[in-house]
Amino acid sequence: MKRDVGYVRRRMMMMKLPSGKAEEKESSRDLMESSVYSEALATELVAISSATSSPGLILRAVDNRNVVLLDSLIEHGQKEVIAHPAVQRYLNDVWMGSLDWAGWKFTAITLVTRWLHIREVSRSSLVQARKFKLFTGEVTTVARHHSRELGLAPDDARQKRGDAPDRRVKTQ
């Protein structure tokens, strides 16, 4: 790297608000140089951290605004840093998850979730059956009540009393 962090900081502190076009061009050029330098610094920081330990330690670091460094890099469009192979490996591990479990743990989780699903389905089926039975019981009770109010008895009761019409076919 050509310049150190102190130089960039001093240069940015000395900058004044531009009063003319020439000063505006110069300050924009200085800002672009500072941006490129900062991005290169971040890329090297990630490369160094990935050589010693996981880059996740730095990428999960929180600044004074309680913003994670990785979120800040994405927000500010630091494509070179995010494109670094160490960062991509870290993001892949976060995205895919690094589950190094034994086979019995996966089997146990699968069996427990299936058991819970079957239990819930059977419980809901039982509740629906009870509701249907209750509903059909209410319908038959209401129908009996109305038929009694209207003086209509069920056919079998009317036949026992003898006042039901004879439905047999009479032969001559």
Image (tube, rainbow, N blue to C red):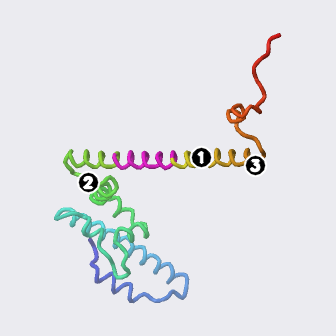
Distance between the alpha carbons at the discs numbered 2 and 1: 56 Å
What amino acid type is highlighted by mark number 1?
A: Gly
Compared across the picture, whether 69 is left or right of 32 comes to: left
- Residue matched to label 1: 137
Which of labels 2 and 1 is toward the front? 1
Q: Position of residue 52 (x, y in %)?
A: 16, 65
Residue 90's place in the image compared with 13, above or below, is above
Horizontal placement of 158 versus 107: left or right? right
Q: Residue at x 77, y 17 (%)?
A: 169
Q: Residue at label 2?
A: 98
Mark 1 and mark 3 lie on one chain; the one further toward the N terminus is 1
Looking at the rendering, in which quadrant would you find the N terminus? bottom left
Please tell me which of labels 2 and 1 falls first in the chain. 2
Magenta run includes residue 117: yes
- Stretch in magenta: 115-129
Which element carries disc 3, helix, strand or loop? helix
Among all residues in the image, which is located at the extreme front?
161
| Location of residue 11 in the rendering, given as x and y in whole percent from the top left corner | 36, 84
Label 2's element? loop
Instruction: Report the residue at 51% width, 86% height from top.
Output: 18
Amino acid marked by disc 3 = Glu
Disc 3 target residue: 149
Where is residue 56 shown, x and y percent of the image?
A: 26, 65
